[in-house]
Structures are given as structure tokens and as C-alpha cells.
Amino acid sequence: MTVHELFPYLCVADADAAVRFYCDVFGGTEKLRLVEPGGRIGHAEVDIGAGVLMICEEFPEYDIRSPAPGAPTSVSLHVHVDDADAAIARALGRGATVLMPVQDQFYGERSGTIRDPFGHRWNIGHSIEQVSAEEMQRRYGRLGQPG
């Protein structure tokens, strides 16, 4: 078996607002929108450069639901951008909240974590140095240790 593509597919309470948010924050372009006669957005696609983000509104009849506001989530989306500080500032200006402020990380990124207005967690970063797996492990093992 060969996997050809992998698409994150997010359920949100307001897909129209989510499409606008992801286009504004990540410079995306809406590619497709399928709307039911009653107005519910059943499927939308946003091209964010490196991939396509798929979005739908809730379908409780199929147990497809958006995250509960403020509830913990077990999924993070990790996106690399040219400038993590600027992307996170744009996200905050559009209603996201900071979960981890932007900072230089031991693994060679400058990154931070936000929760978007729809309940999804995003790690947003850019590369600041190339770090080998061995060096990354050494740094990881020293986290929280003095010196």
C-alpha cells in the first residue's frame, strides 16, 4: 500500500468563519465549498500551500462534532511558516488564544502554540537551526536541569 496524501479534516461549529480564519492566518485559498440546502457546510477545502485543510460543520447524526469550547484536545496540527511570531500574532488578532508563547525551542524551531477560535490546537513554528537527532535527544534529556 502507498499513501499518496494525508489531509487534516476539522469539524467546526461555523465553517464559514473557520475558512476565513485559516485563509487569513495561513494565507490560504478556499478551493471548494459544498453547502446543503439548509445552509450547513458539509465540506470545504482550504489550500494552505503545503497541503489542504478540510473543514466541515457538525453532523451529530453521524457523531461528527466540533471540539467542546475550552476542553482539552488530544490532537495538534503542526505547521511551518516563514515567521511564527507574525502568524501567531495574526491568529491572536482573529480570536485565537495562546497556549504556549512563541520561543526558541531545543529542536531547532521558533514556535508557539495556539487554540483557534474553533477549539483546535496548532503548533506554529519556523526553523532557526538544523539539529541532528542525537543533539536533539541530548538537549531533550537536559530540559529542566540546571546549566
Image: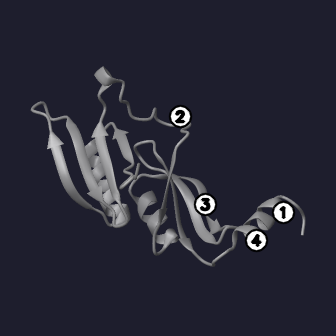
- Which circle's residue, 3 or 1, is located before the other in the chain? 3
Q: Residues within 10 Å of mark 4 (few under 14, many from 20)?
A: few
Which numbered marker is on residue 16?
A: none
Tell me the amino acid under the disc marked 1: Arg
Quadrant (top left, top right, bottom left, bottom right) of the C terminus: bottom right
Distance from disc 1 to disc 4, alpha carbons, whole Å, reads 11 Å
Residue 2: percent from left, percent from top: 40, 52
Label 1 belongs to which residue?
142
Farthest residue, direction top: 61
Q: Nearer the viewer, residue 3 or 97?
A: 3
Label 3 belongs to which residue?
101
Tell me the amino acid under the disc marked 2: Ala
Question: What residue lies at 46% left-to-right and 45% top-to-bottom?
Answer: 120
Label 2 element class: loop
Residue 77: percent from left, percent from top: 48, 52
Whether residue 112 sits left or right of residue 141 in the image: it is left
Label 1 element class: helix
Disc nearest the viewer among 1 and 4: 4
Q: Height in image: 48 above or below 12? A: below
In terms of image quadrants, where is residue 144? bottom right
- Which circle's residue, 4 or 2, is located before the other in the chain? 2
Q: Residues within 10 Å of mark 1 (few under 14, many from 20)?
A: few
Label 3 element class: strand
Residue 48: percent from left, percent from top: 33, 63
Distance from disc 4 to disc 2, alpha carbons, whole Å, reads 35 Å
Label 2 belongs to which residue?
71
Distance from disc 2 to disc 1, alpha carbons, whole Å, reads 31 Å
Whether residue 147 sits left or right of residue 12 in the image: it is right
Distance from disc 4 to disc 3, alpha carbons, whole Å, reads 24 Å
Whether residue 131 sits left or right of residue 8 in the image: it is right
Label 4 belongs to which residue?
135
